[in-house]
């Protein structure tokens, strides 16, 4: 090696040895020099606390790194903070819809409102795109958390949850159930050809008839990324026994998941509450005595109370029963969540407008506005298990909130016209107009969670 080449070699070697230390020093210099994360300050004309049913005037809310950092009347706005003036509006925590199907939209044409046909006509990728759109529509109506309870093709709900969490697009925080677990047939009544030759039931339902199949079904959903387990308690006469429901609950608990039961008979409801299920969907199996047990065991009710104004989606008799049972549940102090089962197209309405229209039934049941708001927020966070991370407008929580004209504690209908939506500290809607630009990214800006 000639001397010149040797000198170059030594220099190169030194570079290789020094490079990590040099890069580390540079990184730490950058860190110490990095400017603090920007601060957003919101001036709220009125701030609602649904937990206590009270409001406070002229509050300042500070947000940094997507979280609430200070809230109060005397909070000083730091120099350089960007200020959002909501002094003419009422700020409310984000709403929760406890039972939606974002990747299912059945219609009069062409499938005559039969989702058995939707599953044949529309593939999962197409339904996933619909779910992304429906999620945006829900967020625009103030729903910052949506529990997505199955009927999502081949796990479109979980794909949507991941896409929103990773930061590809705006949407509510999704609590997905994955596939609905049911006995043979699920909720379908297929022909032998479709059931056994074409296996039509899967993936709309995950059939599990033996104890081994039940355990495996829970594990399948948990493995793929479900955040709650949904079972069909009594969709078929064979249904699930109290012991089998307990098996679902204990298996789901291993993965940190709770179990919701679709219930449509009084017998099914009795088995579900005896087993100590987390939540019950629908109201067909509800009675006064079942409500009393639900209140005592703190079992959530996701009653899916379809308003009479959604023509074709309930009947006068069905609506009368729904209103009476909702009132009975409220009188019995059952933990009530706001839930819709929305999975269809109503011409002229967004999915969010369909969902918010369900307050009509709650008013018809004579439930006071503060209690309706509590069901739409506080109890919704509890059933979604986000109450310690997302929902309440409290220091340390994820910065989600909405703003409306008027006071929802006096008039719940003001929630039908959400003017402002903040999600993870970013403005999604302002002045009644969606402004979602900041939410669209060409990559997973929040990380690449696989599950
Ligand atoms: Zn449903």
Image (cartoon, grey):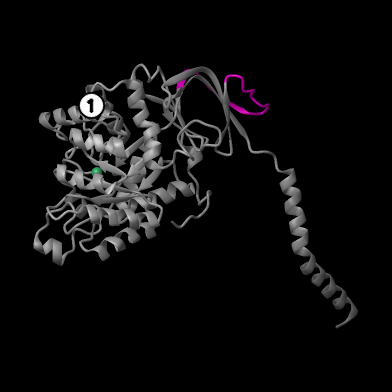
Looking at the image, residue 357 sits to the left or right of residue 60; the answer is left
Q: Position of residue 219 (x, y in %)?
A: 34, 61
Q: Is residue 83 magenta?
A: yes
Q: Is residue 207 magenta?
A: no
Q: Considering the numbered disc 1 on the image, is that residue within a helix, a strand or a loop?
A: helix
Q: Position of residue 234 (x, y in %)?
A: 17, 49
Looking at the image, residue 80 sits to the left or right of residue 383; the answer is right
Can you see residue 341? yes
Residue nearest the viewer, comparing 158 with 220: 220
Q: Which residues are magenta?
A: 73-90
Q: How many marks?
A: 1
Q: Which image quarter holds the N terminus?
A: bottom right
Q: Position of residue 107 (x, y in %)?
A: 19, 42
Label 1 crowd (10 A; few <14 / some 14-19 / many >=20) = some
Residue beneath the point at 84% across and 70% down: 11
Looking at the image, residue 165 sits to the left or right of residue 4; the answer is left
The picture quadrant for ligand 1 comes to top left
158 up-or-down from 87: above or below: below
Can you see residue 181? no
Furthest residue toward right: 3
Q: Position of residue 410 (x, y in %)?
A: 36, 16
Residue beneath the point at 25% across and 44% down: 273
Q: Which image quarter holds the C terminus?
A: bottom left
Residue beneath the point at 16% across and 40% down: 108
Residue nearest the viewer, comparing 390 with 106: 390
Residue receiving disc 1: 327
Looking at the image, residue 380 sits to the left or right of residue 291; the answer is right
Judge: label 1 CB < 8 Å from ligand 1: no
Residue beneath the point at 64% across and 23% down: 76
């Amino acid at each position: 090696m000639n001397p010149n080449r040797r000198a170059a070699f030594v220099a190169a070697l030194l570079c290789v040895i020094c490079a990590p230390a040099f890069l580390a020093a540079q990184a730490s210099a950058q860190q110490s020099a990095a400017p603090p994360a920007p601060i957003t300050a919101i001036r709220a004309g009125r701030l609602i606390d649904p937990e206590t049913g009270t409001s406070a005037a002229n509050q300042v809310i500070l947000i940094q790194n997507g979280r609430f950092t200070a809230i109060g009347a005397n909070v000083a706005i730091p120099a350089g903070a960007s200020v959002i003036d909501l002094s003419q509006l009422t700020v409310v925590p984000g709403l929760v819809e406890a039972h939606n199907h974002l990747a299912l939209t059945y219609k009069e044409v062409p499938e005559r409102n039969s989702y058995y046909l939707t599953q044949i006509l529309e593939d999962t990728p197409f339904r996933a795109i619909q779910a992304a759109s429906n999620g945006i529509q829900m967020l625009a109506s103030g729903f910052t958390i949506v529990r997505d309870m199955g009927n999502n093709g081949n796990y479109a709900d979980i794909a949507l949850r991941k896409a929103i969490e990773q930061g590809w697009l705006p949407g509510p925080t999704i609590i997905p159930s994955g596939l609905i677990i049911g006995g043979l047939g699920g909720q379908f009544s297929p022909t032998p050809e479709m059931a056994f030759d074409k296996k039509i039931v899967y993936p709309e339902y995950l059939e599990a008839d033996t104890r081994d199949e039940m355990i495996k079904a829970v594990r399948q959903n948990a493995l793929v990324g479900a955040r709650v387990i949904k079972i069909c308690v009594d969709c078929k006469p064979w249904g699930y026994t109290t012991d089998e429901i307990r098996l679902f609950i204990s298996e789901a608990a291993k993965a940190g998941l709770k179990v919701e039961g679709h219930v449509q008979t009084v017998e099914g409801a009795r088995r579900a509450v005896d087993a100590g299920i987390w939540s019950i969907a629908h109201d067909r199996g509800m009675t006064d005595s079942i409500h009393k047990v639900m209140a005592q065991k703190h079992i959530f009710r996701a009653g899916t109370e379809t308003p009479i104004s959604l023509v074709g989606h309930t009947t006068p008799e069905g609506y009368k029963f729904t209103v009476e049972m909702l009132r009975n549940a409220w009188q019995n102090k059952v933990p009530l969540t706001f839930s819709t089962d929305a999975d269809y197209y109503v011409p002229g309405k967004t999915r969010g407008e369909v969902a918010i229209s369900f307050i009509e039934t709650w008013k018809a049941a004579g439930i006071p506005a503060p209690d309706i708001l509590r069901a739409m927020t506080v109890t919704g966070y509890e059933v979604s298990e986000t109450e310690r991370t997302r929902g309440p407008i409290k220091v340390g929580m994820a910065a989600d909130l909405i703003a409306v004209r008027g006071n929802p504690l006096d008039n719940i209908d003001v929630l039908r016209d959400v003017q402002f939506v903040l999600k993870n500290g970013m403005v999604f809607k302002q002045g009644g107009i969606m402004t979602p630009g900041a939410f669209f990214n060409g990559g997973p800006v929040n990380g690449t969670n696989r599950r």
